[in-house]
Image (cartoon, rainbow, N blue to C red):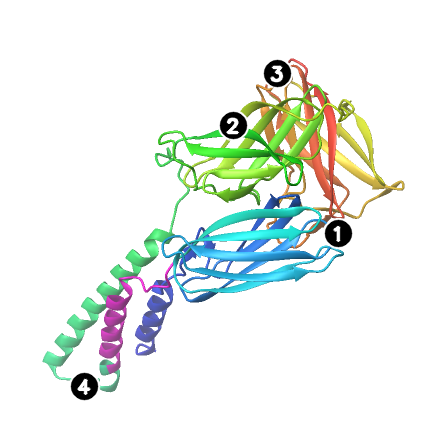
Amino acid sequence: MQRVTPWLMVLFIIAVCWPLHVSAHGIIAGGARVLDVQAGSYPLRIEVTVPTGAPALLTAKVWPQRDLAGATQLSLTATHQDSQATVSQQIIVPAGPRMISVFDVTVPQTGVWELRIQIQDAAHGIGVATVPITIYPNTIPPLTIPMFVAVAILALVLFSTTIWPEARPWVRVVQAHSFTASLSITVVIGVLMVWPNLRVDIPTIDTTSRPYAVTQIIPTHDDQRNIDQLQILVNDGSTGLPVDDIMLHHQALMHLVLIDPASHTFLHLHPARVKPGQYLIDLPVIAQGTYDVAVEIERANSGSQVTHQQVALGVATAQALPAPSPLPATIQSGAYTITVQTTTPAQVGLPVELSAVVTRAGQPVSALDYWLGMRGHMLVRNPNGAIFGHIHAVGAMNDAFEPVSVAGNHVTFVYAFPTAETYAVWVQIMIDGTLITLPVQITVLPL
């Protein structure tokens, strides 16, 4: 038993100190991230699996979120930032129910790549979305080689003591010193390799946050397709340079919310990145008015931020929408009946629970879908727009690519309203792949 114990110690040290996987943009090699974006007139869901090392296979799945009216061409082009090396693939998708297209391209080198995903059909023209990714080299950590040498010496010493138990005194001295030195080196190197991956959650002040981004929203018009668009420019608040370190935040690079209090118009969209610091989104036909446009993004090594800009949009011929319903409210949306209410009256500064309960033909629906990783989203705005909140439903997040449903017919939100006034509230849930927006209003009472 005494001769076996040192060998077990060596195996334990090797297991603990073995090099960990390299990650790419926070994704373990071979992992995937899901992105929701609107490319032209098509809302797309994209899943990108980022490899480690090169040459390697990069996989992207593209799933239009509505049925295709005609034969549609999907293409993926990956371009290396420095060498301009390019790989591409095209897929023709037949008309009919939405289906997943899978791209497999071999990237020849590591570094920063830009994926350009294009969708094109005869009816709606071209839609483009670009996604930057980084492929890291699959290298051996610098401390791995000396650690292996130390482990080899340690194993050799233990082996010699096992087969030569009656060694001469000077040999035993060499064995003892070699064992102590190699064991010490192995432990020290092992600690140095593992230490960066250990963390203790101690509240600290973040001194690495980057400056806030400055956004500019420019209304444009695509003459060829005769459709209104919004161009969103994102620049660094310190240098003025285009911002290209925006991270995925609830399955989107950017959340764009348009609200017109006069016509009660509400849109929650996800613009496509077309190049560094520039995003583009097609607009549906909306009522003419002055819109409060909120841009929500999250930069790397920083937190999320929301910017606002008043923009004149819409056409005079579009009709205004009905005013939000005061709570409790029962709203009919297609075949679904949704009841929205709070468990207690809303009061300033006190958390209030708001729930939406869904039935169909008088019976509870069996399940609700996840949308943007959550079971529901709630956006709130006070009359002058000074208070704007984006709240997620109570429950765990789910980043699955294909639809995930959770049993039950209700979703719950918790929010503490900061002022005593009447808020406009939009609850968004997804049922059987259909997004439903429920406009209501909540009157918050003083304490």
Q: Nearer the viewer, residue 321 or 11?
A: 321
Q: Where is residue 109? Give x, y as percent.
A: 39, 62
The residue identified by callout 2 is 307
What residue sits 22% from the left and 84% below the top?
165
Query: What's the residue at 65%, 37% (across, down)?
Result: 393
Query: In the rendering, at what x and y percent does residue 415 appear?
Result: 63, 28
Write down the residue under mark 3: 384
Frontmost residue, 341 versus 286: 286
> Farthest residue toward the right?
361
Quarter in which the C terminus is drawn: top right
Kindly report which numbered mark, 4 or 3, lies closer to the viewer in this rendering.
Answer: 3
Disc 4 element: loop
Callout 3: 10 Å neighbours few (<14), some, many (20+)?
Answer: few
Give the residue pinned by disc 1: 69
Amino acid type assigned to the residue bearing label 2 in the image: Thr
Residue 427 in the figure: left or right of residue 417: right
Amino acid type, label 3: Asn
| Residue at the disc numbered 4 | 166
Q: Residue at x 67, y 37 (%)?
A: 226
In magenta, the rendered stretch is: 136-159
Q: Is label 2 in a helix, a strand or a loop?
A: strand
Give me the C-alpha separation between circle 4 and circle 2. Answer: 78 Å
User: Which tag, 1 or 2, sits closer to the chain's start?
Assistant: 1
Residue 377 in view of the camera: yes
First in sequence: mark 4 vs mark 2: 4
